[in-house]
Image: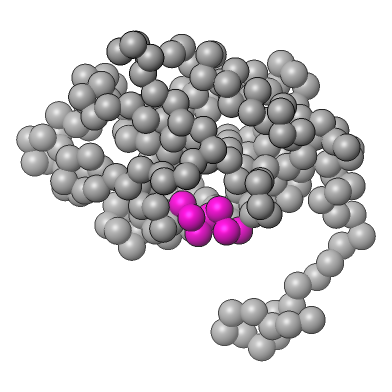
Amino acid sequence: MSAVGNSTNIFWHECPVGQLDRQKLLNQRGCVVWITGLSGSGKSTLACSLGRELHSRGKLSYILDGDNLRHGLNKDLGFKSEDRAENIRRVGEVAKLFADAGLICIASLISPYRKDRDACRALLPDGSFIEVFLNMPLEVCEERDSKGLYKLARAGKIKGFTGIDDPYEPPLNCEIELQLKDGICPTPSAMAGQVASYLQDRSFLHYE
């Protein structure tokens, strides 16, 4: 056993029922589907559509939505760069636990900084972190602006808003990239189907 962190009396406790046992019980393999993109790109909508698609196939998933988490787990965090990093770190650790439980964890967050997303990827075994880049142009996201946030950011009433006065760093090697086709956004169900097919092809939807 080895100590972790700054304490000398914290140790990892192994239990007899492990991830493989839980995956066999659920007949699926745990993983994290990490949906990233600008505000208004459709991350939460895609997450819900994917969750519905997996449910219809008899697969257990759970959605970690960035806004929802700021009502509880991350309600003490703001939007400064260090708070954003801590926000993503916490979600990454929770997502890892869900994957270890054998669930398909769907994390839906802007997660603008590449290093923070990469740190979450490093928490999972190779191949178990599926980064989905919802690559929608800023003008499309701003035109939607269902929450009115872009309008406030343009008016200077919100500072550090991703895509306006704070950067978004797109993935360099994501597993899935979803974007406009002939200037038209695919339907949420079509995009969810694409992600579900990826999971099916890589044996996440059944246990071997």
Can the viewer see residue 96? yes
Residue found 59% across the figure and 26% down from its top: 195
Magenta-colored stretch includes residue 119: yes
User: What is the residue that sits farthest to the bottom in this orientation?
Assistant: 8
The x, y position of residue 187, in whole percent, is 46, 12
Which region shows up in magenta?
A: 117-123
The x, y position of residue 101, in whole percent, is 75, 47
The x, y position of residue 112, in whole percent, is 35, 47
Residue found 32% across the figure and 35% down from its top: 38
Magenta-colored stretch includes residue 198: no
Residue found 25% across the figure and 43% down from its top: 162
Is 153 rendered above or below residue 47? below
144 left or right, relative to 176: left
Label total for image: 0
Q: Quadrant of the N terminus?
A: bottom right
Q: How is the image coloured?
A: one colour
The x, y position of residue 50, in whole percent, is 59, 23
Q: Main secondary structure of the magenta part?
A: helix
Query: Which corner quadrant of the image does residue 53 belong to?
Result: top right
Residue found 33% across the figure and 26% down from its top: 136
Is 192 rendered above or below residue 207? above
User: What is the residue that sits farthest to the right in this orientation?
Assistant: 16
